[in-house]
Amino acid sequence: MTVAGNLAIWRDKYSVKAKVPNGDPMQMEGVAACIMKRNNDGIRLWLIDNPFAANDITD
């Protein structure tokens, strides 16, 4: 995580395995990036979540 004042950007790899409504399996993986802002209580709130951040770099 990179922090600048009350703002932060976070990047992480993820992998998801699940079943779609008809029961077929699905798998997805990638790199997510999100921007957060710290509120007055010190809790980071998500402002932007991009689950396809790696696509933005490689396309």
Image (cartoon, grey):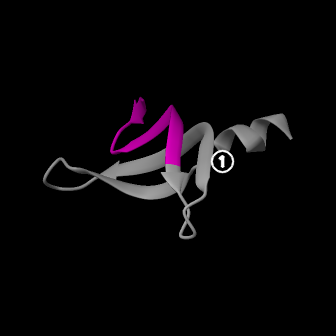
Residue 56, percent from left and from top: 76, 44
Task: Pick the quarter of the image with the C terminus.
Answer: top right
The overriding secondary structure of the stretch rendered in magenta is: strand
Apparent side of residue 27 relative to residue 19 in the rendered image (left or right): right
Q: In percent of the image, x 23 and y 55: which residue is there?
A: 39
Magenta range is: 1-17
Q: In percent of the image, x 70 and y 37: which residue is there?
A: 54
Q: Relative to residue 20, is residue 1 depicted above or below?
A: above
Q: Relative to residue 34, is residue 4 depicted above or below?
A: above
Q: Is residue 24 magenta?
A: no
Apparent side of residue 44 relative to residue 31 in the rendered image (left or right): left
**Farthest residue toward the left?**
41
Residue tagged 1 = 52
Mark 1 surroundings within 10 Å by alpha-carbon count, few (fewer than 14), some (14 through 19), many (20 or more): few
Could you say which is closer to the camera, residue 39 or residue 11? 11
Q: Relative to residue 23, is residue 32 depicted above or below?
A: above
Apparent side of residue 29 relative to residue 44 in the rendered image (left or right): right
**Farthest residue toward the bottom?**
21
**Number of marks present in the image shown:** 1
Tell me which amino acid carries mark 1: Phe
Apparent side of residue 59 relative to residue 8 in the rendered image (left or right): right
Q: In percent of the image, x 50 and y 51: which residue is there?
A: 18
**Farthest residue toward the right?**
59
Could you say which is closer to the camera, residue 38 or residue 33? 33
Q: Which quarter of the figure has residue 58? A: top right
* Secondary element at tag 1: loop
Could you say which is closer to the camera, residue 7 or residue 51? 51
Residue 1, percent from left and from top: 42, 29
Q: In percent of the image, x 38 and y 55: which residue is there?
A: 46
Q: Is residue 7 magenta?
A: yes
Residue 5, percent from left and from top: 35, 39
